[in-house]
């Protein structure tokens, strides 16, 4: 997590100040429940709340204590006692460190998910706007990087919209799955704390109770969360790679916005490089790289060990902060993407009509020619275009075997671009709805 690829709102979730404030709220809400149950004096809960809410937790002081205790939660509780005074003896009753750590971590992941969902909403808005703008902008579709058949640039963007709509659904599900609370004590048995305390804390923090917490909240939840982030990152890379290809000099059908004063190369003043989408490709790799460690955290020893702890202290902030930055960068790229319809048309025409080969093939089969023979007839004329730069329509109309089956008018009709876009509205209704 470095400032260059960070945004303040997401970064603040992972600050020590935020973490200690959440720890305090967990402990204070637990005191409220204990007071309601008659386990501790109500005045003690009120004192802890009053003094803790008014305090600014001293991160340096907590770090100083931890250097002695070698235990972060104890260091925090010691500092809290310095603030609260005598009533601090009631804090953390029947609880264990994981109750605080795991519940806090899930609160942070939920808050991070809310930001990421809002980020995806921005991407979706940008994609929808640009998709409708270019709904009828005809361009060449490519398979294996080679010209295939015509589509529209709007359909390309609609596909990305559908993909990120699924990303949003997955993030919502991941948020729901990880939004659990555990206040169950050592080995999760509730031996020293009433389950009603957990229920109270969960409700206060907007979480659900963890059905069975073996001192730790099961890490399959977190594995799913980070796997979802990895999938979203892969979707970012997919569209970033598409834009990078489209910006190549030989293609130049779309291009990242190049702002006034921007420089593309320290050596070559003419350069306009796809630096943002290349950056997104790299950031996606980072986020995906944090998925496997999250999955390996699932297998902990017995009721608890802390082999997952160091991993999560890093991947929690790094994955969410990086993805947050990447999603916003992607939204900006889409919003300002420069599109060149005239270059799309030039590229469509580049292969002399070869993009219509399937229509000619099918027309021949519909006139009684076997598929194998029809394929051979079309391909032999197509190869002249590839190898000699010939015009496909001209070659077909000069081929006696073809004209013996199809009239020149019938051949020409197969070169209508509109044929390939006749179902664009259907695709858009499926993606965006009737509106």
Image: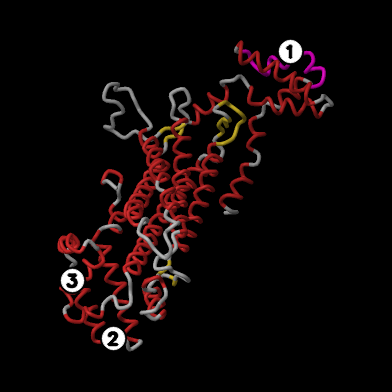
User: Residue at point 27% right, 63% down?
Assistant: 19
Residue carrying label 3: 55
Under circle 2, the secondary element is loop
Number of other residues with Cα within 10 Å of mark 3, as a class: few under 14, some 14 to 19, many 20 or more: few
Q: Is residue 352 left or right of residue 50?
A: right
- Tell me the magenta residue range: 390-406
Q: Which mark is residue 398?
A: 1
Q: Is residue 321 magenta?
A: no
Label 2 to label 3, Cα distance in Å?
Answer: 22 Å
The residue labelled by disc 2 is: 40
Which numbered tag is attached to residue 70? none
Is residue 410 toward the left or the right of residue 419 in the image?
A: right
What secondary structure prevails in the magenta region?
helix
- Between 88 and 17, the one nearer to me in the picture: 88
Local SS, label 3 = loop
Marks 3,1: beta carbons within 8 A: no
Query: Which quarter of the image is occupied by the C terminus?
Result: bottom right
Please name the residue shown 72% across and 17% down the image: 396
Numbered-mark total:
3
In the rendered image, residue 428, in percent from the top left (x then y), is placed at: 59, 47
């Amino acid at each position: 997590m470095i400032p260059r690829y960070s945004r303040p709102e997401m970064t603040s979730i992972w600050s020590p100040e935020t973490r200690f404030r959440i720890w305090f709220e967990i402990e204070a809400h637990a005191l409220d429940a204990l007071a309601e149950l008659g386990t501790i004096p109500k005045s003690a809960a009120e004192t802890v709340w009053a003094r803790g809410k008014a305090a600014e937790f001293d991160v340096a002081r907590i770090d100083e204590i931890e250097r002695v205790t070698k235990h972060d939660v104890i260091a925090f509780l010691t500092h809290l006692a310095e603030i609260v005074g005598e009533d601090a003896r009631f804090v953390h009753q029947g609880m264990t460190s994981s109750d605080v750590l795991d519940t806090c971590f899930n609160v942070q992941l939920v808050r991070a998910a809310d930001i990421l969902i809002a980020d995806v909403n921005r991407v979706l808005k940008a994609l929808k706007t640009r998709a409708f703008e270019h709904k009828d902008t005809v361009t060449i579709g490519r398979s294996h990087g080679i010209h295939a058949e015509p589509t529209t640039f709007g359909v390309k963007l609609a596909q990305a919209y559908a993909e990120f709509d699924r990303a949003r659904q997955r993030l919502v599900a991941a948020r729901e799955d990880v939004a659990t609370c555990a206040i169950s004590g050592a080995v999760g048995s509730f031996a020293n704390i009433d389950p009603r305390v957990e229920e109270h804390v969960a409700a206060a923090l907007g979480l659900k109770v963890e059905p069975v917490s073996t001192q730790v909240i099961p890490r399959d939840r977190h594995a799913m969360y980070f796997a979802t982030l990895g999938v979203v990152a892969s979707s970012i890379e997919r569209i970033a790679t598409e834009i990078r290809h489209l910006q190549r000099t030989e293609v130049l059908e779309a291009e990242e916005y190049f702002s006034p004063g921007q420089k593309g190369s320290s050596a070559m003043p003419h350069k306009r490089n796809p630096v943002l989408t290349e950056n997104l490709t790299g950031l996606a790799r980072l986020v995906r790289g944090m998925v496997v460690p999250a999955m390996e955290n699932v297998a902990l020893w017995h009721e608890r060990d802390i082999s997952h702890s160091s991993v999560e202290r890093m991947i929690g902030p790094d994955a969410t902060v990086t993805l947050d930055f990447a999603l916003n960068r992607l939204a900006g790229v889409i919003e300002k993407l420069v599109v060149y319809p005239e270059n799309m048309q030039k590229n469509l025409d580049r292969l002399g009509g070869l993009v219509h080969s399937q229509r000619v093939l099918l027309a021949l089969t519909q006139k009684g020619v076997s598929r194998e023979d029809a394929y051979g007839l079309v391909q032999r004329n197509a190869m002249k275009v590839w190898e000699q730069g010939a015009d496909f329509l001209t070659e077909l109309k000069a081929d006696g075997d073809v004209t013996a089956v199809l009239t020149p008018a019938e051949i020409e009709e197969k070169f209508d671009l509109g044929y390939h876009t006749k179902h664009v509205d259907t695709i858009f209704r499926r993606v965006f709805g009737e509106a």
